Amino acid sequence: MDKDNNNEIFPIVDPDGNVTGHASRGECHNGSMLLHPVVHLHVFDSTGRLYLQQRPLWKDIQPGKWDTAVGGHVDFGEETSDALLREAREELELTEFKASFIRSYVFESTRERELVNVFSTVTDRTPRPSVELAGGRFWTREEILQAIGTGVLTPNFEQEYQMLFQSRP
């Protein structure tokens, strides 16, 4: 895989997650601001380190930056829980984990709007990044805080981390 499939079909949703239509990835990422759902899974180890993935250089959004361990779109007709399991399996070969729902929120950039469904899990299994990623590793809280604002992390991850975890012990 060396480019995103702009023909993938995503559901278009309202801020409560109700499906109102569908559009292609290309339409959702071209500045149309069509709200489409995604899943994020924050993967912690038992010491509190957080696993981040490095986005490959061929990605259409935020290439080469460090991001949430698992992140992906919900396909049209797919349940959010099924998308979470699929993305975790595809990106990190995680198949047996208990995900806790944290919250949903709308993320908006200059290019797109996403309804982000955020989950977390704790595992002592080392994730195995697939060819969909450029790599990954566990980060300490201090490493993440030092990287915020330097351009190393995706803006979405920075916002989400500060909103959900920055005050975490």
Image (tube, helix red, strand yellow):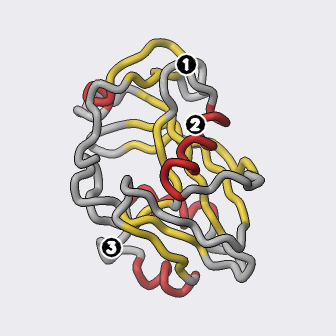
Q: Is mark 2 on a helix, strand or loop?
A: helix
Q: Specify which label sits upstream in the sequence, 2 or 3.
A: 2
Is the residue marked by circle 1 packed among few (<14), some (14-19), or many (20+) residues within 10 Å?
Answer: few
Give the alpha-carbon distance from disc 2 to disc 3, as whole Å. 27 Å
Q: Specify which label sits upstream in the sequence, 1 or 2.
A: 1
Identified by mark 2, the residue type is Ala
Residue found 44% across the figure and 85% down from its top: 146
Q: Specify which label sits upstream in the sequence, 1 or 3.
A: 1
Identified by mark 3, the residue type is Val
Residue found 49% across the figure and 85% down from its top: 143
Q: Quadrant of the C terminus?
A: bottom right
Name the side, left or right, on which 132 lies relative to 59: right
Q: Mark 3 points at which residue?
A: 152
Residue 105 image offset from top left, x and y in percent: 57, 42
Residue 35 image offset from top left, x and y in percent: 43, 29
Give the alpha-carbon distance from disc 1 to disc 2, as whole Å. 10 Å
Q: Closer to the camera, 87 or 11? A: 87
Q: Name the residue under label 1.
A: 77
Residue found 55% across the figure and 28% down from its top: 15
User: Which of the labelled discs sits on residue 32, or is there none?
Assistant: none
Q: Mark 2 points at which residue?
A: 83
Residue 109 image offset from top left, x and y in percent: 33, 45
Residue 163 image offset from top left, x and y in percent: 58, 61
Identified by mark 1, the residue type is Gly
In the image as oriented, which residue stretches furthest toward the top?
A: 21
Q: Closer to the camera, 94 or 14? A: 94
Q: Which of marks 2 and 3 is in front?
A: 2
Identify whether 154 is placed above or below 27: below
Task: State the image quarter where residue 18 is shown.
Answer: top right
Give the alpha-carbon distance from disc 1 to disc 3, as whole Å. 34 Å
